[in-house]
Amino acid sequence: MSTLNSSVDRDRPSTWRPYTDGACNTCVASCCMLPVEVKASDLIRLNLTTADEIENSIKKTAKRLKKEGVISSYREGSEFFMLTQKSNNDCYFLDSKTRRCTVYENRPDTCRGFPMKLGPRISFCPVVKN
């Protein structure tokens, strides 16, 4: 492991590196090992539910998605859903072989905005080179 990699800890944003264009091309998708909160609109875009189902009962939708293993929790006050992480902390939608997002075109707004608009340290990334 290089010196760059050994000093970056994805759980400690103070160790993250400034984001640069192309950083994702050689990274092991370390940002895809962070917890991801999504809104109902993201779940609709991902074709995991419909607007009608959400409007009918967001709690029932959350219960179904939790049972299916897509989400790990739902916070009623904020209406945020937490996507499930695999046992190795990978995102539910991350391909473990290619280390690429399997739903990239429909990815949640949280992922679309990271790291330039959203995240614990704006414009910084937990990049780890492969």
Image (spheres, rainbow, N blue to C red):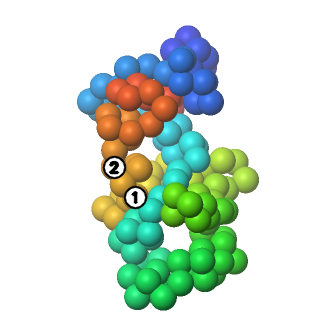
Give the SS element for disc 2: helix
Assign the N terminus to one quadrant of the image.
top right
**Badge 2: residue crowd in 10 Å (few <14, some 14–19, many ≥20):** some
The answer to whether residue 20 is above or below residue 84 is above
In the rendered structure, the answer to whether residue 38 lies left or right of residue 1 reads: left
Residue at point 47%, 59% (across, down): 38
In the image, residue 117 sits, relative to residue 17, either above or below, namely below
Q: Residue at x 67, y 56 (%)?
A: 86
Report crowding for label 1: few under 14, some 14 to 19, many 20 or more residues within 10 A (C-alpha): many
What secondary structure is marked by label 1? Answer: loop
- Decide which of 19, 98 is in the foreground and name it: 19
Residue nearer the viewer, 39 or 103 = 39
Residue positioned 44% across, 19% down in the render: 17
Residue most toward the top? 3
What amino acid is found at the position of numbered circle 2 in the picture?
A: Arg
Q: What residue is drawn where x is 61% and y is 82%?
A: 60
The relative height of residue 53 versus residue 40 in the rendered view (above or below) is below
Residue 50 percent across, percent down from the top left: 41, 83
**Residue at which label 1 appears:** 108
